[in-house]
Amino acid sequence: MSNIFFWRKKREEEKAEANQSDAASNSQDLVATELPKRNSKAGIRSLFSRVKFDLESLEQLEEILIQADFGVDSAESIVLEVKKIAKTQGAQSEAELKTILAGVIRDKLATGNRELNLTSGKLPYVILVVGVNGVGKTTTIGKLATWLTQGNWKVVLGAADTFRAAAVDQLATWADRAGVKLVGPSSEGQDPASVAFEAVEYAVQYEADVVIIDTAGRLQNKTDLMDELSKIRRVIEKQAEIAEVLLVLDATTGQNGLVQARAFAEAISVTGIALTKLDGSAKGGIVVAIQNELAIPIKLVGVGEGVEDFAFFDPEEFANGLVA
Amino acid sequence: MFGNLSDRLAETFKALRGKGRLSAADIDGTLREIRKALLEADVALEVVKNFISAIRERALGDEVSASLNPAQQVVQIVNEELIQILGGEARKLRYGKVSPTVIMLAGLQGSGKTTLAGKLAKWLKSEGENPLLVAADLQRPNAVDQLKVLGQKVSVEVYSPEVGSGVGDPVKVAKDSIAHARSKGNTVVIVDTAGRLGVDQEMMNQAKKIRDAIKPDETLFVIDAMLGQDAVNVAKAFEDGVGISAVVLTKLDGDARGGAALSVASVTGKPIIFSSTGESLDAFEPFYPDRMASRILDMGDILTLIEQAQKQFDEQSALEMAEKLAKENFTLEDFLEQMQQLRKMGSLKSMLAMMPGAGQMRQQLDSIDEKEIDRTEAIIRSMTPVERTNPKVLNGSRRTRIARGSGMSVTDVNSLVNRFEQAAKMMKTVAKGGTPQIPGMPAGMGGVVPRKRPKDSKKKTGSKSGNPAKRAAQEQARANGSGSQESGAGSAFGIGN
């Protein structure tokens, strides 16, 4: 994330400063900011904590990968590649093989743009957060909001999960913690699309930099609920472009993760994945299959319940962590 | 693309179906497929390995080679082994010797504990208990509020002395709740706890302290059906950390293959006792290992369905319906009545998903428009009693009138009548004990055909398991007859459908 700048609106005091030093005033009233760094290293546990990894146990590699939720097909293809590379390189030692494995996994995850789309300068950036029940959507939003606020961004949260009991309260607590404005339903069970609309409307009026919309968890095989997402998208787009549709995926999820990603991608054109609960014993190997099949980049990882427990996904770090 | 484990196994067994004799190679090939299917269904690797070796051992034994229909025998073995892993006989909730019975819920974040607490409370009430909900998840923001809302919805008191969201001591809340329940005369206490990771030592210790403070009669480990390979580690961690007495499986209404159920049951040896199948607070039922195994094997969850139906169906009208079925004079009138009965039972889709062969119709099921029922109802309601009992009188001018009366087109009326005739034909076949042929199962038909299947299938399951030899003979006869008798939405391997 080093040299990427995110463009937000200038605050009044910044405008004043810019006027004083004429040289720096670019015609726009946007300012490039670097947002605080986050680190995910704590989150990843090695595949090989209990197993030795050498040429003999290469056969077992497939099983090890399966146990990390890579799935049978991905596991098979990774093993084949590792074997091929090991053969051409004449690799023998554990260290060499691990480097090769890490490289194969990294390459599978390194495609696509993993930056958050907060660079276009078209404000407010709308981030829509979707996923099945219980994956950590609301928590992820809380963390994102805090992070953006720390970068002096003006954030609005839209509580469009009007279904689950107390979901709005839960988001409100996060909004309080981050010190940002929350737009929620004015009556119980209000149509989520209308809440999303009002949140974006408010963000436009209030000249916010970002508006993050929380949605109700929905299982991807419920057609009517998936259709609701398209409706939410349509009403938002009446007022602002959607910068980012984040699919939140629980790292403990197995092969159904791919089915989830497929369904959500089809329903609402997902632009990135937030992989949560990576601080547990789960490895989230299904993301390899997701990236391979759907080319949806993993953008964020969640590594705890604390407000700062998230990071930008780094394939290199992830792969190295897995084989460490 | 396979919808789930049932579908995978169905595909696998198709190849075996009708084979008179299985070679070792046949069995190995099948086992490879089963292995892959189970892994793709998220059954943990170590569990799969044990499972496969148990099947192999039995499949190579005498019981298979001596059987009339070896393929069916393999299916039977897989079914039995699945049931065994899933916990054999259904186990009931264990009540304490002295009131109140204490139930503690534990599990990962987002597995559905709080929602489950609400459902459990509602169910206990219907069982005549007087439950108390205890808000001991003081971690997650507003988990306490969530439980309060749920308590209100099911009219159950919620003990929530702390506001939560990081404030308060869950051990104390849990402990005090027992005295509170005693003073209020509650018979069951349900303690909702914070979600925690298996590797989080501090939080596991806290769970242990809660357990020691309340000495639960049941410590229910809540997992969701989407859980992957990590199920094994998580289950072990909770078993070692708090000690669990039974498992609850949530989000079964999704399309996840649910292999975690097998993993957890196998690793902990603890029974799964409840399953949670939807966002409505009624979407909660006891877990029956044999039914789950049947479901995995795509034999449909007929018993569950019948039980749900029994709750709603007026018994008298059900009896009359059965008589009509036997006499084969099933009319549009009955059709409408059944549709209305079904309506009462809740979401049509979740009902249909329990039907045998539903795995193969999953795509169609997902695309069912529940409005279709409204439309069908409108059409039937626009018919005269004579037309409803005898659709044969429906000539062109009658159809035009019905279309106008129901706000539909004549084509819609025609297609309804066609579907009804097909269904009626199928039912006659079933009533005679034959296997229904369901051609193509068009999407619109999804709302029609299975409606009659609870009864047929009940009958058929009975007759079939009672006489496997006859079944095998039928199978054989069919195989010898026309080669293209495979029905589009038929069962996996000729059982239960």
Image (tube, coloured by chain):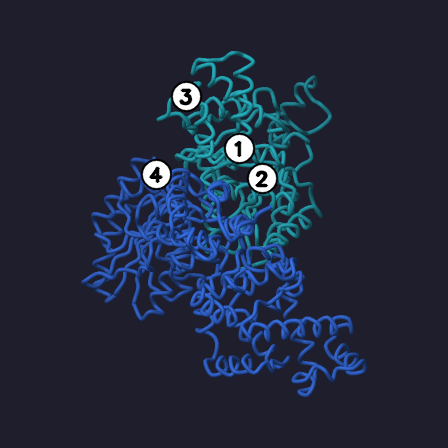
Q: Answer few, some or many: residues within 10 Å of disc 2's Cα (few below 14, many 20 plus, some between 14 and 19).
A: many
Query: Closer to the observer: label 2 or label 3?
Result: 3
Residue B100 vertical placement versus B318 (above, below): above
Quick check: marks 1 and 2 in contact, CB under 8 Å?
Answer: yes
**Mark 3 lies on residue:** A53
Residue at the limit of the structure toward the bottom, as seen here: B386
State the CA–CA distance, disc 2 to disc 3: 36 Å
- Give the position of the C terminus of chain A as an image quadrant: top left
Chain coloured blue here: B
Q: Amino acid at mark 4?
A: Gly
SS under mark 2: strand
Q: Amino acid at mark 2?
A: Leu
**Mark 1 lies on residue:** A300
State the CA–CA distance, disc 1 to disc 2: 9 Å
Q: Answer few, some or many: residues within 10 Å of disc 4's Cα (few below 14, many 20 plus, some between 14 and 19).
A: many
User: Residue drawn 23% across and 52% down?
Assistant: B175
B248 lies left or right of B251: left
SS under mark 3: loop
Image location (x, y in percent) of residue B23: 48, 44
Compare marks 1 and 3 and give the one earlier in the sequence: 3
Are callouts 3 and 4 both on one chain?
no
Q: Chain of mark 1?
A: A
Q: Which mark is residue B235?
A: none
Q: Chain of mark 4?
A: B
Are callouts 1 and 3 both on one chain?
yes
